Image (cartoon, rainbow, N blue to C red):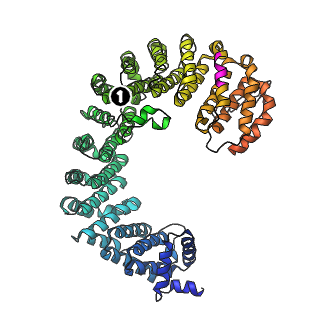
Amino acid sequence: MDAAMAALCDPSQPEAFDGLVKQLMSPSNEERRHAEGLFAEMRKHADPTALQLVRVIRTSPAAESRGMCAVLLRKVITKDEASLWPAITDPAKATVKQELMNAIQEEPERSICHKLCDTISELGAGILEEGGWPELMPFMFQCVQSGQARLQENALLIFSQLAQYMADAFIPYLGTLHGVLKQCICQAASSEVRTAALKATTAFISTIEAPQERDRFQDMLPDMLSTLSHSLQTGEEKTAQEALEMFIEVAETHPRFLRKQLAPVTDAMLQVAEADSLEDSTRQLAAEFLVTLAEAREKAPGMMRKLPNFSTRIFVCVTGFLLDIEDDPDWHLAEDEAQEDAGQGELFDVGQECLDRLALSMGGKTILPAASQVLPGYAQDQDWKKRHAGLIVLAQIAEGCQKEMLQQLGPIIDLCLAGAQDPHPRVRWAAFQALGQLSSDLGPDLQTNQHAKVMPVMIGAMEDFQNPRVQAHAAAAIVNFSENCSSDIMPQYLDGIISKLLILLQGGKKMAQEGALTAMASVADCAQQSFVKYYDAVIPYLKSILTGATDKSHRLLRAKAMECISLVGMAVGRERFRQDAKGVMEILVSLQNSALDDDDPISSYMLQAWARLCKCLGQEFLPYMQIVMPPLLQSAQLKPDVRVLDADEENEDEDDDEVETILLGDKKN
């Protein structure tokens, strides 16, 4: 051991190690790296390392140093492959354990106490069950019954963390634990103690596997709710949010624990979620608890569906979250998709997610009747936010309510079509959001039975040049409609669709042009040979964008033009596409060989375009293989995974969606 290391390890020279601790917290990367190297070397000396860390924790006047050493001690002595604990001598181990217990009694800083609790918990988890710390459990019970708020909180935090590691080891103590936890939740004057007791209680409920042992805490549910209620009544919403997170943990792990007192628990949580006066984050957590319970179908089947009035109240509540929206001017600028959510508050996003999850977990037989009570009123309301919300609801619940919504398809589509004529552009946007989502979730029935009503409205909306975001979203809805549309329905609308899309490509805003390209590609893919009639009118515009959209702000537009050309080529077939194929391929080769930025979307679109063109051109694509493949594989850092099979050879990957099979003459690639 050299002199510098000897000084670091010598408790009689505290300034050396104290200086190292300061360097470990240095804002200078170089100084900090040097200190980390010294500390890594010091770890080879287990006793001095542990004892020096303990010394700083117990004696340093600098709170920052004490906190740092509490973290470092946890890292070096807790159980993992790099733990020093096995190498520490028994006398040093005894000192560390005793000083940690002394520290949480005497440390004045609450944040450092919490770090020490983490250290004690993780060390205890590794050695308690082996009899390595017999003093700890009596010490914790002594602290929790001491009547001193700081000691009680510390002990309760340690209990809650130890429960995560070794809950079953506490089963012999559950009777005593139940008593002290109940006393702390009910009688403690300190909100920190009540919250820590709640945390310990929910930790034991969540981690104890035996239902009969877990149910010992059943009588504490009203007290647990009172803790939440008290925090809200005294304006301590951060504390209330901590409590709600603990209830969510119980709902996730053991929802059946709540069954016997389900009505009062859900009523209390609904009141929180419904309270406009509370912070959005508080209401969001209460809703998360309720939706989590609704999703617990495997652990508690049918529990929430059978609860009277629950489905209607939670539906009304989370639908109300959708009113957290303002008519932000940035939304109307429609410069790009990044502002599509402009004006939407945090609760709006939460409401969308909750509706989707509720529909999937509770099903259409439960959710659609609740929707039927709410949506007609929203559709007729003078407030545009409610009309907007009603349409968003339809989009969000469609996947989970598919069967039931198909039975009421006509009236549902009529609601959407009325929204598409609404005077407010954000409501019209929501109508096309709904129509697009319904086209995906309720197709192909929607396309087959409602195309005559839906398609003219979608096509007409693309004329709304005053509201390019609505234009673009109508085009996006056509994409969804096309994906589930049979090729015998689409041709009758092609004249109108293609003419409107070409107008958008010529004069629309960039975002509307991007939407038009995606719609054109999707329509071509659906129409197939019926698209041949429009090929000569469409392809010049696509090639013009491919060659002319060179500005960095138009990269996505050019990438979508590439996608569209490849899908149009596949739709019309090799004979029709051949006359333009060579020119298109030369443009793509030029683009591929150019110095594209790492984030240029062209790179990801290119691979798919080559695959489609290869399918379209067959053997005529072979001259391009040696040009196309090497740079593509290099840029994507992929290993070539290409196999050539005889045409009659069985291909075991044929049904794999992730494997492309391309016919080249009498060979398969």
Vertical relation: 190 (above or below) 592: below
Please name the predominant secondary structure of the magenta segment in the image. helix
Q: Is residue 646 visible?
A: no
The stretch drawn in magenta includes residue 302 = no
Q: Residue at x 21, y 43 (%)?
A: 264
Range shown magenta: 537-542
Q: Does residue 134 appear in the picture of this structure? A: yes
Image quadrant where one finds the N terminus? bottom right
Question: Which residue bears the numbered disc 1?
Answer: 388
Residue 632 screen position, x and y as percent: 72, 40
Quarter of the view holding residue 271: top left
Foreground pick, 253 / 381: 381
**Which amino acid lies under the numbered mark 1 shown in the image of this protein?**
His
Q: Secondary structure at mark 1?
A: helix
Quarter of the image for residue 398 reads top left
Q: Quadrant of the C terminus?
A: top right
The residue that appears at 50% across and 19% down in the rendered structure is: 444
On the image, the x and y values in percent for residue 59 come to 38, 81
Q: Quadrant of residue 645?
A: top right
User: Where residue 353 sits in the image (x, y, percent)?
Assistant: 39, 37
Q: Residue 494, how many percent across, how many down?
A: 56, 13
Query: Where 603 falls versus 476 (above or below)?
Result: below
Query: Badge 1: how crowded within 10 Å, few (<14), some, or many (20+)?
Result: many
